[in-house]
Image (cartoon, rainbow, N blue to C red):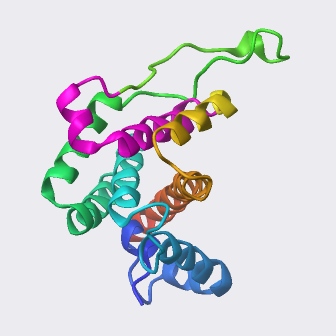
Amino acid sequence: MTDVIDRLAGVTPGGRVDALRRHRPATRDNAQASYDALFTTIDETHASASERAAVAQFVAALHDDEGAVAHYAAVTRQAGGDPLADAVADLAIAARTTGPYGEYPADAPLAGESVAGLRFAIDDADTRAALGERLDAALEHAHLLVFRPREASVAALARLADAGWSTAGIVTLSQLVSFLAFQLRVAAGLRLLTTEDAA
């Protein structure tokens, strides 16, 4: 079985970092099992393979992880074709920013920590038509979760429902974005260790 985190991190089989990962086999195996549950052995009733792949490619690009972008772009091409992967790549360029940021409710204890930032929306009519309402909404929501998590709300979830996402689909989408945040951070940390080994 290919371990995706190992591949993204450039872990060399038999090396020090590989040994460290194998020291905690349950953690390693469960991370891969999560990937498989989201991308390999899936029920497409509520979230299709191409939707999952496109969101993952977009989130990887928002995290500015070139290896992960290449991996998930390949998954998108396989699941949804070159035009979808190319469209997501173009959108990710326009969506890149820094964060986290967002607005707390005016009466919230942390209201004074509100920070303004990009509110990503797919404005181009041709792009919106090509992607479809569901994927448009999913990418916009993924951007919110990555950069404006403090603005996650019932209203934000309602926008997904209005675009055709079921409750189970919304849960899957949220799990996917959360998993990517975990996976990419682990891979980045391991990549630092493999770089130290190479030095």
Q: Main secondary structure of the magenta part?
A: helix
Coordinates of residue 183 in the picture (x, y in percent): 52, 61
Q: Is residue 62 left or right of residue 160?
A: left
| In the foreground, 178 or 49 | 49
Tell me if residue 47 comes above or below residue 100 in the rendering: below
> Which residue reaches farthest left?
82
Q: Is residue 85 left or right of residue 21?
A: left
Residue 199 seen in the figure: no
Q: Split into 4 quadrants, where in the image is the C terminus?
A: bottom left
**Residue occupying image coordinates x 29% and y 66%:** 75
Residue 123 counted in the magenta span: yes
Q: Split into 4 quadrants, where in the image is the N terminus?
A: bottom left
Residue 175 seen in the figure: yes
Coordinates of residue 16 in the picture (x, y in percent): 50, 81
Residue 57 counted in the magenta span: no
| In the foreground, 109 or 136 | 136
**Residue occupying image coordinates x 50% and y 65%:** 190
Coordinates of residue 78 in the picture (x, y in percent): 22, 69
Coordinates of residue 61 in the picture (x, y in percent): 34, 45
Tell me if residue 130 comes above or below residue 180 in the rendering: above
| In the foreground, 58 or 83 | 83
Tell me if residue 21 comes above or below residue 162 in the rendering: below
Q: Quadrant of residue 48?
A: bottom left
Q: Quadrant of residue 123?
A: top left
Count of numbered circles on the image: 0
**Residue occupying image coordinates x 71% and y 18%:** 104
Q: Is residue 136 left or right of residue 161?
A: left
| In the foreground, 182 or 170 | 170
Q: Which residues are magenta?
A: 122-149
